[in-house]
Amino acid sequence: MSTPTHPGSRPAVRGGVDSRLPWWALVLPVLAFAALLALILDPAKAHATTADPAVTHLVERIRHLIGR
Protein backbone atom coordinates (compact mmCIF):
# COMPACT_ATOMS: atom_id res chain seq x y z
CA MET A 1 0.00 0.00 0.00
CA SER A 2 1.48 3.33 -1.03
CA THR A 3 1.40 6.51 0.97
CA PRO A 4 0.14 9.59 -0.84
CA THR A 5 2.72 12.34 -1.23
CA HIS A 6 2.01 16.01 -0.94
CA PRO A 7 4.30 18.13 -3.14
CA GLY A 8 3.57 21.29 -1.16
CA SER A 9 4.46 19.79 2.22
CA ARG A 10 8.07 21.07 2.25
CA PRO A 11 8.62 24.51 3.79
CA ALA A 12 9.68 27.19 1.36
CA VAL A 13 13.22 28.53 1.70
CA ARG A 14 13.23 32.28 2.10
CA GLY A 15 16.25 34.24 0.98
CA GLY A 16 18.20 31.18 -0.15
CA VAL A 17 21.16 29.59 1.58
CA ASP A 18 24.34 31.56 2.17
CA SER A 19 27.03 29.19 0.89
CA ARG A 20 29.92 31.65 0.78
CA LEU A 21 32.99 30.86 2.83
CA PRO A 22 35.02 33.47 4.68
CA TRP A 23 38.41 34.25 3.15
CA TRP A 24 40.35 32.54 5.93
CA ALA A 25 38.50 29.26 5.42
CA LEU A 26 40.34 28.89 2.11
CA VAL A 27 43.62 30.65 2.85
CA LEU A 28 44.56 28.87 6.08
CA PRO A 29 44.43 25.31 4.71
CA VAL A 30 46.41 26.40 1.65
CA LEU A 31 49.09 27.99 3.85
CA ALA A 32 49.28 24.91 6.09
CA PHE A 33 49.61 22.63 3.07
CA ALA A 34 52.34 24.81 1.57
CA ALA A 35 54.28 24.85 4.85
CA LEU A 36 54.11 21.07 5.23
CA LEU A 37 55.07 20.56 1.60
CA ALA A 38 58.08 22.85 2.06
CA LEU A 39 59.18 20.81 5.08
CA ILE A 40 58.86 17.56 3.17
CA LEU A 41 60.78 18.84 0.15
CA ASP A 42 63.63 20.22 2.26
CA PRO A 43 63.90 18.06 5.41
CA ALA A 44 67.15 19.77 6.50
CA LYS A 45 65.13 22.83 7.53
CA ALA A 46 62.66 20.79 9.60
CA HIS A 47 64.86 20.90 12.75
CA ALA A 48 63.85 17.31 13.53
CA THR A 49 67.14 15.66 12.72
CA THR A 50 66.73 12.88 15.29
CA ALA A 51 64.41 10.95 12.97
CA ASP A 52 64.84 7.30 12.12
CA PRO A 53 67.31 6.85 9.22
CA ALA A 54 64.74 4.74 7.35
CA VAL A 55 62.23 7.61 7.42
CA THR A 56 64.89 10.05 6.26
CA HIS A 57 65.83 7.70 3.45
CA LEU A 58 62.17 7.35 2.44
CA VAL A 59 61.67 11.13 2.37
CA GLU A 60 64.83 11.58 0.30
CA ARG A 61 63.64 8.87 -2.11
CA ILE A 62 60.24 10.57 -2.51
CA ARG A 63 61.96 13.93 -3.01
CA HIS A 64 64.15 12.42 -5.67
CA LEU A 65 61.13 10.92 -7.47
CA ILE A 66 59.25 14.21 -7.36
CA GLY A 67 62.26 16.11 -8.67
CA ARG A 68 62.42 14.11 -11.89
Image (cartoon, rainbow, N blue to C red):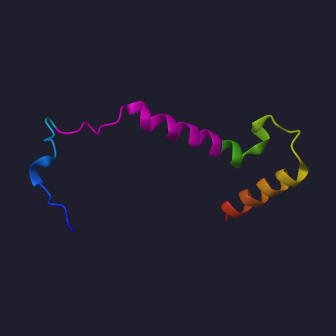
Q: What span is colored magenta in the figure?
A: 16-37
Residue drawn at (50%, 34%) of the image: 28
Q: Is residue 45 visible?
A: yes
As drawn, which residue projects farthest toward the left? Answer: 8
Residue 15, picture quadrant: top left
Number of marks in picture: 0
The front one of 42 and 23 is 23
Residue drawn at (53%, 37%) of the image: 31
The front one of 41 and 11 is 11
Q: Main secondary structure of the magenta part?
A: helix
The x, y position of residue 59, in whole percent, is 77, 54
53 w.r.t. 45: above or below: below
Residue drawn at (36%, 31%) of the image: 22
The x, y position of residue 43, in whole percent, is 76, 44
The front one of 31 and 16 is 16
26 w.r.t. 1: above or below: above
Residue drawn at (21%, 68%) of the image: 1
Locate residue 34 relative to residue 10 in the image: left or right: right
Q: Quadrant of the C terminus?
A: bottom right
Residue 36, picture quadrant: top right
Locate residue 45 relative to residue 33 in the image: left or right: right
Q: Is residue 33 magenta?
A: yes
Q: Is residue 67 visible?
A: no
The x, y position of residue 16, in whole percent, is 18, 39
